[in-house]
Image (cartoon, coloured by chain):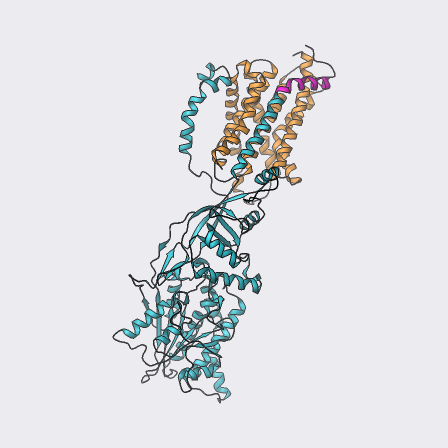
Amino acid sequence: MTLYHFGNCLALIYAPYHMAYKYSGISEYASFSKCVYAGGLYIFTQLCKMLLLATFFPDSDSSPVEGEYNVILEILKSTVDFADLLGIYFALNSVPGKGHAKILTSAIGWASAELVVTRTVLLWVGARGSEFDWRYVRSCAESNVALIQHAATATLVWLWTRSDLPKKHSPIVVSLLALTPYRALIEEAIGSIFHLCAWALVAVRAIHASAVGLSALATYAILAQQIGI
Amino acid sequence: MWLDEADGFAEIFKGYLPFYLFVALPIFIIMSPVNPVAASHEFSVYRMQQYDLHTVPHGCRSASFNLEGRSLTSWSTSRHCVVARVQDITLEQFLEIRNKAGALLLVLPKNETLLTPEEREHIQLLEMAMVQQEINAPVYFARWTPEMEDILADLQHSFITDDKSGTALEAMFNTVSSNGYQIVVSAPTPQKLDSKPVTLHGKLIGRSGSAQTIVIAANYDSAALVPEISQGADCNASGAVALLELARIFSRIYSTAGGRGAPTLVFVLTSVGHSLNYFATKKWLEEQLDSSDASLLQDVSFVSCMECVSRGPVRMHVSRPPRAPSPAHSFRARLGAPLQHKKINLADELLAWHHERFSIRRMTAFTLSSLQSHKDSGRSTVLDTPSEDRIQNLVSNVARIARALASHIYNITDDENDEDAGLYDDVLNVDEAAIRYWYNYLSSQSRSAHIVTTSPNGGVTGALERVLSRYMEVTVSTHAVDKREPEYTLYSPTSATLYVYSVKPAVFDLILTLAIVCYLAVVYFAIQAFPRFYEEYAKIVTGKTKVQ
């Protein structure tokens, strides 16, 4: 399409991030450099993950049987995503301040880095071409969902690090955390079982992210109320 | 570092980013390629033929276009490329498109054999109408593919029209939901092809002392509207195959001195057929008759041309009915074919039959063909594809012609004994496997004049030369078109790559902007309302109000 269309996509993809940063109150903590640091950690984590995947997993593109879906292999591959949790943990540790500032700063930094690394090039190449495809608009919407997902994950990681987390809530946190790396896999499975179209899949992602987000928020609220922040 | 100095995101926007953007954006835009993404649809398309006959232009005169695709019903201006199935377009619609539309893309039927006779007739008539006159807009043909079917369906059910829709909301919905297609073909501008038609001939020498000659001729090109997809199975692969088989049979008989018949047999394969007025035959005759040693074509008994001989029993087309004692009459009587008489009309642009070239040079000549009339639309159509029952027709016709020819050469009368008849069958046995092989080979190749006359030593011509030289010594004569007043001119390109981009109308972007702005406003208010939401939510979860 046109440069105008590219601008549209850019607005859809970046404006929510900007607003989240600007209006959530963390900009008052002057933590832009911390956001960048979290982003740097994201990139480093991805490199480590790639190294792992390339070393220990067979090349999926050159597999002899085309179209066959190896479930075990996919689950194992998703397991590598536990490295993300580790990365978020380091990001949280490096940010000074109260709990919610820590969480939001690292989540926004992390998600923005993902955005810049994975989607900008795609948009630049795709949305500016003369071909129109809903895919690019969809990818922009997906990145908004990703922000909620990362915020939820960061909250869970933060809760998990707290030693004063109520005992009865820790199983919820741990199980939600353990499910986080398999998030994409579960969503795709749901999509293929119910033969969902791409837009419905985005909706599924959004519902999933908000469900996890709300439960994380609930636990956070309980803890916050308990320790008085 | 500037990151530390900047006191937050907003400051970077205010302080640094605009200056970086001023430099970076233009650089990005200059650096990025003009068309960074490949089209999601790419098709091989074949251009309608373009040629001049005696400097009268025919066919489509241009090659490149970049236009919006529309269906037969929704196109309106020369900025549209009409996309349609070839069986859907009517003659009236075509005439209108020829005058007004920017380009035409026709999709061939999925399976030619499943067409009804009416549809076949319609397509053939359309082809004839298309080639009659020149078209300034580019015309391309594409083979059927599932992707092409999707595009066709999309265009047919598209709501993008220039008429006003019922309501503004309806119009808005239409622009969002429907797909538009930008169709692009970038091909070089049409260029004259260096056409060098050839004629292959060889002879089987008869008994010494007899100067009689029988000429058997056929052209091996095809004449469909689209050079790249003109298989020409019936016209005229069948004629060329029949000639090869006759050459094989009679070369065997003539190989022994005892079996040799009186007349000399001359086999002539020419590379240009009726669509270009049998130009190669004309040139070949000039060479043979007007040169100083005109030995080959002295005392010709008759010339037998073969064209489209696989559609049923053959007829004999003549320009003057043969009289009783002549060899042609004797051959016809033995062949038992019905006579079809048509006088030569020199005022016509094209000669009707191959034999007229010989008749003009005062030889007794006739064409053997299954067709009723030279105006049959099946002579030049893309639907002329090989089929099994045509092979059977071809085999029986070749056997019949071979028998009649042999009985004429050896002057065998009907009252022969059974032993002779058995011998006769054995000698004249038609090799069905060879016929099938050559028929399938020739009709698998596009043999339009645009292709066979521009590669004189390779491809089909080379193959035919090799197979004919198994039976006799073959002479290849290459003819040239007159430089100043060309009898015909052929033009490239014959094929191109077509790109289809799916696009949305310009209004769509505005609507999308509106939607995004609404969405962002919702996000903004959601973030603003989040603290209050959190308070209420915490109250519900913990059952108490937040301790301040």
Identify the image quadrant of residue B323. Answer: bottom left
**Residue in view at x 62 percent, y 35 percent:** A201
Residue B458 picture location, percent across and down: 37, 61
Q: Which chain is cyan?
A: B
Pick the front one: B62 or A227: B62
Query: Viewed as shown, does residue B109 lie left or right of B209?
Result: right
Residue numbers of the magenta segment: B528-547
**Residue in view at x 64 percent, y 38 percent:** A191
- From this view, report whether residue B432 is shown above or below residue B488: below
Identify the image quadrant of residue B476. Answer: bottom left
Query: Viewed as shown, does residue B453 lie left or right of B6?
Result: left
Residue A118, visible in the rendered structure: no
Is B13 covered by the magenta stretch? no
Query: Total number of numbered labels?
Result: 0
Residue extending furthest toward the right:
B543
Residue B284 picture location, percent across and down: 33, 70
Residue A51 picture location, percent across and down: 50, 30
Q: Which chain is orange?
A: A
**Residue in view at x 58 percent, y 38 percent:** B176
